[in-house]
Image (tube, rainbow, N blue to C red):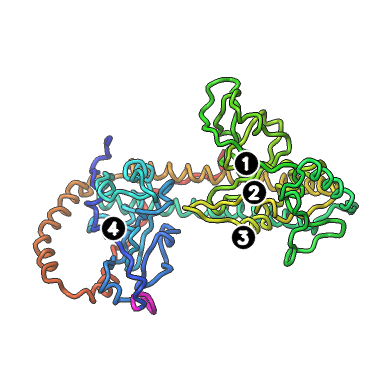
Amino acid sequence: MGGLPEGWAWARLGDLGEWFGGGTPSKKEPDYWEGGDVPWLSPKDMKAERLADVQDRITERAVNESSVRMVPRDSVAIVTRSGVLEHSVPVALVPFATTLNQDMKAVVAYPGVLPEWIAWALRRYERRILDECRKAGTTVASLSTPALMSMLVPVPPFEEQQCIVAALEENLSRLDTASATLKKVRSRGSALQKQMISAVISGRRRAVGSESDADDFISQVDEQVARVAGKKRWAQVRNPEVTGLYEIPAGWCWRTLGSLCLDIQYGTSAKTSPKSNVDDVPVIRMGNIQGGELDLRDLKFLPASHPDIEKSILRDGDLLFNRTNSAELVGKSAVYRNRMGVAVYASYLIRCRFAEGVEPDWVNMVVNSNFGRRYIASVVTQQVGQANVNSTKMALMPIPVPPPAEQREALKVLRDWESALTRPQLAAGAAVKRATGLKSAILRMAFNGDLVPQDPADEPAATLLARIVAEREAAEPARKAAKRAARPRKATVAAAATKAAPAPTPAPSASVQQELFDQ
């Protein structure tokens, strides 16, 4: 495990405190839930490093009659089963007594171990927990309890724990405040961009002198679609149901997406692989659609001789939309351009090829707008954790259509606006990334013993841990006797709520300071 500072020792997580599991009282028993005032902590509550409250409560009857246990206040809670464990491990200090959902664990630290130290240890070694404790092959990501309990973490002397925790909280609180402000800047920029798009596609933001009539243009589109698409159903449905939709300017018209298309086609289902030959053709997949654009950094390939290449080859201006994904991502779209090189597309994408005069970027903007997202949400179907939308439903999406010149002018206005937003957005994003790196660096210093000065007079952690073991062994006969006595559980709620909290930590003996925006 590597060396430790003088006076520190390695310890199993399971040996640092009493661990509690959770459960869910039966929903068929209204008396377990209605009017309850006992907190019931679940993964959806784990949104802060120190919790202030929970969303759900149960009754004392549920505590007495179900599998849930009261966890004393000042515990450390950790999510052990959730999709979020694919990438992170939510950890929080809980300053109040609570019960737990079955997807949670909580630990109440033994005397001599600060709960804050355990919490910071879980955050510091998050990556190791995911690598070594996450179960493989399960439907929903989860952590192995034995593996988690057996994981070794460093423990300093108690006095040094207090100093390190105080230094961490002083420095990281400032860092977290700065990061929150930066994230608000990015969120505000995204909100402004969405507002601008809504204004453009509704015609509220029109270029001066751009007013014209789309009738002649639409007649030309209809002729092209009738000539190329023939009697295909998606080409025949031209006028969408517009009841309840917003007003569009005079000279614009509502049309279905399909009535603007010469072709709507699913992609290749052929098995792809990493590039092996210089002539291999890249295959654009659903993960390549990011934020309304194509991200081509992660590609798979097909041999140039594959029979699907010819029918799936992309042309400049083809719109690709994602027909299968999570509910928040399904239906997202992007436009392919020739400058990206020769490419084909996979079967989870649908290609729309437009009539001349229809700007693909205009349609793409509508599909990815709040208006487009609301339409897609209204027509998706859910199957085994995936949301799906087929070509027929996408073809019926209402599209506000201005004349070609006005489409181009509106897109130019929007690009200028986005360019002005991009600079502060990129700066904020880079600063958030630096803040994340700085937080990791501070945590490494803390757990390497480099954050605060050490005092050789402090009681060594090995002595502390040995005393914890001795006290537990001495208390074991009494604990077993109490368990055999099966005393009533009614007192557990009040007892947990009144259990003494650890003494406050002293002021830090040192702190780490670093300007967030230093280049």
Q: Amino acid at mark 2?
A: Ser
Q: CA distance from mark 4 to mark 3?
A: 43 Å
**Residue 399 part of the magenta-drawn span:** no
Q: Nearer the viewer, residue 382 or 412?
A: 382
Label 2 crowd bin: few (<14), some (14–19), many (20+), radius 10 Å: some
Quarter the N terminus occupies = top left
Which dot marks residue 391? 2
Task: Give the mark, 3 or 1, whose residue is nearer the N terminus.
Answer: 1
Q: Amino acid at mark 3?
A: Ser
Residue 512 shown left or right of residue 345 in the figure: left
Q: CB of mark 2 within 8 Å of CB of mark 4?
A: no
Residue in the image at 86% along x and 49% along y: 219
Residue 471: give x, y in percent of width and height: 14, 57
Q: Amino acid at mark 1?
A: Tyr
Q: CB of mark 2 within 8 Å of CB of mark 1?
A: yes
Q: Secondary structure at mark 2?
A: helix
Task: Give the mark, 2 or 1, whose residue is nearer the N terminus.
Answer: 1
Q: Nearer the viewer, residue 133 or 260?
A: 260
**Above-or-below relation of 443 to 35:** above
Residue at numbered disc 3: 378
Residue at numbered disc 1: 266
Residue 98 shown left or right of residue 190 in the figure: left
Residue at numbered disc 4: 107
Residue 285: give x, y in percent of width and height: 57, 38
Task: Give the mark, 2 or 3, whose residue is nearer the N terminus.
Answer: 3
> Which residue range is magenta in the image?
31-37
Q: Amino acid at mark 4?
A: Val
**Which numbered disc, 4 or 1, marks the residue closer to the eye?**
1
